[in-house]
Image (cartoon, rainbow, N blue to C red):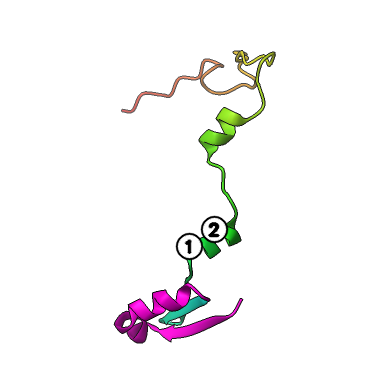
Amino acid sequence: MPHSEWNIADAKSKLSEVLNRAEEKAQIITRRNRQYVVMDGDAYRRLTGSVTSLKELILNGPSLEGVDLKRDRSPGRETPKNRGYRPSAKT
């Protein structure tokens, strides 16, 4: 993807120009050796695709009809709690 690069001072002083250019191609702003990308929102959405929320996945997912969702109440394994363990009182 073509891009233009800016240092942070120039990007701050010419923010409107950075944003206008971002409509055509990505703009990279460098601050303390880290790079940040400014791009058009539509281009960003095309790159990232649509992300489905967990709520949407659950509500629109497969039907759970006929699935046994009862909890197994057996202890499963021995733990201090289910074998009668009692911590000693502090003195």
Magenta region includes residue 19: yes
Residue 89 x %, y %: 36, 23
The residue sitting at 40% across, 74% down in the picture is 19
**Of helix, strand and loop, which one carries label 1?**
helix
Whether residues under marks 2 and 1 lie with C-beta atoms below 8 angstroms apart, the answer is: yes
Res 36 seen here: no
Q: Is 57 within the magenta?
A: no
Q: Choose top left, top right, bottom left or bottom right for residue 11.
A: bottom left
Which label is found at residue 41?
1
Task: Please tell me how crowded label 2 is: few (under 14), some (14-19), or many (20+) other residues with Cα within 10 Å.
Answer: few
The amino acid pointed to by label 2 is: Arg
> Which stretch did the figure color magenta?
1-24
Query: What percent of the width, then of the height, locates residue 16?
Result: 34, 77
What's the amino acid at mark 1? Gly
Q: Nearer the viewer, residue 76 or 51?
A: 51
Instruction: Give me the residue at 53% from left, 76% from top.
Output: 25
Q: Is residue 58 visible?
A: yes
Q: Is residue 39 above or below residue 5?
A: above
| Residue in the foreground of this view, choosing between 67 and 47 | 47
The structure residue drawn at horizontal position 48% and vertical position 62%, both measured from the top left corner, is 41
Question: From the viewer's perspective, is 7 left or right of 70?
Answer: left
Q: Which mark is residue 45?
A: 2
Mark 2 residue element:
helix
For image coordinates 59% across by 80% down, the residue present is: 2
Looking at the rendering, in which quadrant would you find the C terminus? top left
Query: How many residues crowd mark 1 within 10 Å: few (<14), some (14–19), many (20+)?
Result: few
Q: Residue furthest right?
A: 66
Residue 42 picture location, percent across and down: 52, 61
